[in-house]
Structure formats: C-alpha cells, structure tokens
Amino acid sequence: MTERDTARTLAHPELDEIRLEGVLHALSDPIRLSIVRELAASETELACSYFVLPVTKSTTTHHFRVLRESGVIRQCYRGTAKMSGLRSADLQALYPGLLDGVLTAAAAEEARLAKVPAAG
C-alpha cells in the first residue's frame, strides 16, 4: 500500500464499536435519512456525487461523515470517486429489523405527507 493509498483510507467503526444511539442519531436527520433510503434502494455502492442534496458541499460531507462514523455506511475511494454503501448486514446483525423498520416508516411518512394538501 502506498502512502497516497493510506491517506485516502477512511476510518470506520468495527462491528463491536457501533452503538445504537449513534445509529439512531445518524438516521434522525432528514438529509441523512434520504441518503440511506437512496443507498437501500440501490443494488450497488453509489458515488457521493450521485446525490443531489439541498445543502452545501461541506454540509454534504458532514452528513456522509456522520453516517460513516456511526457505522451506517461504509465508504471507500475508487479512483477519484468516493463510493458509499449501506452496512445493511452489519446493522441487521446488531439490531435485527431496525433498518428495515426505519426505512418502512420513512416510506409510510412520505406517502402520508404526499396526501396532505398544501396550506394556503
């Protein structure tokens, strides 16, 4: 491994370092939840540049860092792209049904809010 490769390696918590409160905190933000929903719907890892978010680039970077450091996603560099993937199997092993429940609830809320007429 070259010095450049080492500099581009991202830190991730080991399975025994992932904590429920960190996962719940990461999933509690609407932007981060939208990222997780996109990753869950994808068959493969997605580049960070794939996501179109209503925040600045630095805030986007922050959201991905929170997700990575809490153990919700895994990131790696492929060439110049930073790729992200959901740690579904790890989260299922630690907290059975949690991720599926959150994703189901988020979809139900989206459907419910879509039916609510706009005020005005």
Image (tube, helix red, strand yellow):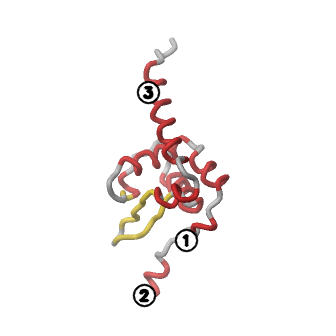
Image check: 59 left or right of 41?
A: right
Q: Does 22 appear above or below 4?
A: above
Disc 2 residue type (three-letter)? Met
Give how far apart the Cα atoms at labels 1 and 2 are: 16 Å
The label nearer to you, 3 versus 1, is 3
Residue carrying label 2: 1
Residue 84 in which image quadrant = bottom left
Looking at the rendered structure, the secondary structure element under dot 3 is helix
Residue 113, position as x, y percentages in the image: 48, 24
Residue carrying label 3: 111
Q: Does 109 appear above or below 28?
A: above
The label nearer to you, 2 versus 3, is 3
* Residue at the (59%, 59%) spot, across then down: 70
Disc 1 residue type (three-letter)? Ala
Residue 20, position as x, y percentages in the image: 64, 54
Image check: 41 left or right of 24?
A: left
Residue carrying label 1: 11
Give how far apart the Cα atoms at labels 2 and 3 are: 48 Å
Sequence order check, earlier mark of 1 and 2: 2
Disc 3 residue type (three-letter)? Ala
Residue 47, position as x, y percentages in the image: 37, 59
* Residue at the (51%, 35%) spot, across then down: 105
In the picture as drawn, the residue positioned furthest to the right comes out as: 21
In the picture as drawn, the residue positioned furthest to the top comes out as: 120
